[in-house]
């Protein structure tokens, strides 16, 4: 039988696990999502408060000061970060979590060895794995953060014998891990394992291009979840196992969804170094010098003003130009004229899945106007005007029609089915995949070149007199 | 294998099913907040850091425990606060944001 204090802790843990699950469940609709997050946060408070009752804790000084410092740092960044910088924010917090898991595993091993307790093989394996996964997630996330924040170059950094070196690192880690499990490596072995894992995390992410970082973050997120679950095994704490696995499962699912939306396998993202050598063989080179038709802001305004239905397709170019608010103002003006305005969001628009929705929500666009790819693709046939703002590869019909295209098979928005298409673009430059876009040469397409925000402002001005 | 390990494996596997089931219902509109919220949840590992820091009896363990608590707390607080900031912005057509 547990003593009363242990029972209270155990019950509190069960309660907070339930709160986590209910919180995540409420994230399935924008209407309830905020309360879901708050429910999960409450679950966290319950779990942390219960932990403080643990008799193993002799001094509260380090815990108190550490929590205060961490909370201040975390809250400061969370309050001040720009919404466009969300991917690197998630990467940074994820690295913190991974670092915590690795440190807890190492510390527990040191404590057990010093106390002269026998460490079971299961415990030792959990400690070794928790150390490896946590440390890889820590340095990997820091490198991902550096790339997204443009402290490090975004293009894939490759070095000679890279796969061989990574392979050797992995092999020596497995060997070292084996000796730790059979109990003949001691604390020096574990420190060595920590160092190797930290190195591997950095070397593993460096060769991956900046455009693929969101997938990497998603993988690292699930790895940190797994590391947390492993520390649960080390500390005999089921709460950590449940919460860690929930995160591991969600990260895995998101990773798969993202790679599918990009039409690439996870292995291709991790080892392909996409963008290292731009897809020069660009199959559809026959479209190379076909003509394009330009238009003006005034003509665009007239086309929009007399349309019955308009669908706006925002891409990352919109976020780069910080034109979310301008586009929303234009949409409001159009709605006042009785035009039906919707937004079509590709799953990988922006720099992480669902990123564009956050950016538009920030600009006060109501979420019932944001349509997902499957919802909107059937509607393009009845749409008078599609306004593409800073999107490229996700509206390229070659992904659907041209088997020789490098992006063939990637799910796209069927923009070319609409009656008129107006593309706002900075220049004829290529998208992330570095290939030509047949949509720009379509007879129904008009191009309006220039900075997205300036163009949108000009259209809004012209609309007043249209 | 001890009972405890078997129990742990049970919990581990059942939690995988719960995780997939709950998360597959989240629409792509909310994938960024979802990633951010789960990111905050794995900050739960801070409770391991608290146990380490609270029971540390050597300088090394105290230092390790302190760094772990700082990292973990930053993960938890930052994660939940930034998710709340994002979700606060999701509004329906009529509800005007007052921020």
Image (cartoon, rainbow, N blue to C red):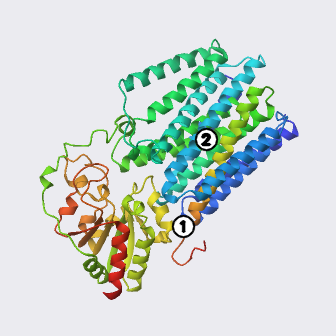
Q: Residue furthest right?
A: A4
Whole-angstrom CA distance, mark 2 to mark 1, is 27 Å
Against A192, residue B25 (above or below) is below
Mark 1 lies on a secondary structure that is: loop
Seen at 76% across and 31% down, the residue is B62
State which chain disc 2 sits on.
A
Left or right relative to A253: residue A262: left
Q: Position of residue A128 (x, y in %)?
A: 60, 24
* Label 1 CA crowd tier, 10 Å (few <14, some 14–19, many 20+): many
Q: Position of residue A59 (x, y in %)?
A: 84, 36
The residue to which callout 1 is attached is: B90
Left or right relative to A47: residue A1: right
Is residue A457 among the parts visible in the rendering? yes
Look at the numbered discs 2 and 1 and tell me whether their residues touch, using CB distance below 8 Å.
no
Look at the image and tell me in which quarter the C terminus of chain A lies.
bottom left
* Label 2 CA crowd tier, 10 Å (few <14, some 14–19, many 20+): many
Q: Nearer the viewer, residue A80 or A130?
A: A80
The residue to which callout 2 is attached is: A96
Residue A24, image quadrant? bottom right
Q: Position of residue A74 (x, y in %)?
A: 64, 50
Q: Residue furthest top?
A: A184
Seen at 49% across and 43% down, the residue is A146
Left or right relative to A440: residue A272: right
Left or right relative to A117: residue A410: left
Q: Position of residue A411 (x, y in %)?
A: 32, 54
Q: Nearer the viewer, mark 2 or mark 1?
A: 2
Against A344, residue B13 (above or below) is above
* Disc 2 with disc 1 on a shared chain: no
State which chain disc 1 sits on.
B
Residue A135, image quadrant? top right
Look at the image and tell me in which quarter the N terminus of chain A lies.
top right
Residue A39, image quadrant? bottom right
């Amino acid at each position: 039988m547990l003593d009363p204090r242990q029972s209270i802790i155990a019950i509190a843990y069960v309660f907070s696990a339930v709160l986590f699950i209910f919180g995540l469940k409420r994230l399935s609709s924008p209407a309830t999502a905020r309360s879901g997050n708050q429910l999960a946060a409450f679950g966290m408070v319950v779990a942390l408060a219960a932990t403080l009752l643990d008799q193993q804790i002799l001094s509260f000084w380090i815990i108190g000061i550490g929590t205060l410092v961490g909370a201040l740092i975390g809250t400061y960044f969370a309050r001040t970060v720009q919404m466009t910088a969300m991917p690197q924010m998630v990467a940074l917090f994820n690295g913190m979590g991974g670092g915590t898991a690795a440190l807890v595993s190492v510390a527990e091993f040191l404590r057990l060895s010093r106390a002269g307790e026998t460490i079971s093989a299961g415990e030792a394996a959990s400690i070794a794995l928790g150390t490896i996964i946590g440390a890889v997630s820590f340095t990997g996330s820091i490198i991902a953060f550096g790339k997204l924040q443009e402290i490090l170059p975004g293009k894939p950094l490759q070095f000679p014998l890279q796969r061989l070196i990574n392979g050797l690192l992995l092999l020596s880690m497995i060997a070292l891990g084996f000796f730790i499990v059979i109990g003949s490596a001691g604390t020096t072995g574990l420190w060595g394992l920590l160092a190797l894992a930290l190195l591997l995390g950095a070397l593993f992410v460096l060769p991956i291009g900046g455009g693929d970082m969101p997938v990497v973050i998603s993988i690292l997120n699930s790895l940190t979840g797994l590391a947390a679950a492993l520390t649960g095994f080390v500390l005999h704490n089921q709460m950590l196992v449940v919460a860690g696995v929930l995160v591991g499962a969600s990260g895995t699912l998101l990773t798969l969804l993202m790679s599918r939306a990009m039409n690439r396998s996870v292995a291709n993202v991790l080892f392909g170094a996409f963008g290292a050598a731009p897809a020069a063989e660009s199959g559809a080179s026959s479209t190379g010098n076909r003509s394009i038709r330009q238009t003006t802001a005034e003509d665009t305004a007239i086309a929009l003003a007399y349309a019955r239905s308009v669908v706006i397709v925002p891409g990352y170019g919109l976020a780069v130009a910080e034109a979310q608010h301008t586009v929303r103002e234009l949409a409001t003006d159009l709605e006042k004229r009785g035009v039906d305005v919707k937004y079509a969001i590709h799953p990988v628009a922006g720099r992480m899945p669902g990123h564009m929705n956050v950016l538009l929500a920030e600009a006060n666009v109501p979420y019932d106007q944001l349509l997902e790819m499957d919802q909107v693709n059937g509607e393009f046939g009845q749409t008078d005007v599609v306004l593409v703002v800073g999107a490229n590869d996700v509206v390229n019909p070659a992904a659907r029609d041209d088997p020789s295209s490098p992006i063939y098979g990637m799910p796209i928005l069927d923009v070319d089915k609409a009656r008129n298409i107006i593309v706002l673009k900075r220049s004829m430059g290529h998208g992330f995949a570095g290939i030509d876009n047949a949509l720009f040469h379509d007879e129904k397409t008009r191009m309006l070149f220039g900075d997205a925000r300036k163009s949108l402002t000009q259209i809004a001005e012209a609309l007043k007199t249209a | 294998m001890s009972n405890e390990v078997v129990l742990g494996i049970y919990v581990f596997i059942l939690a995988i099913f719960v995780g997939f089931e709950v998360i597959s219902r989240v629409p792509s509109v909310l994938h960024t907040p979802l990633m951010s919220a789960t990111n905050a949840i794995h900050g739960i590992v801070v409770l391991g850091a608290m146990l380490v820091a609270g029971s540390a009896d050597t300088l090394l363990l105290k230092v390790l425990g302190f760094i772990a608590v700082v990292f973990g707390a930053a993960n938890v607080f930052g994660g939940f606060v930034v998710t709340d900031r994002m979700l606060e912005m999701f509004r329906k057509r009529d509800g005007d944001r007052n921020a």
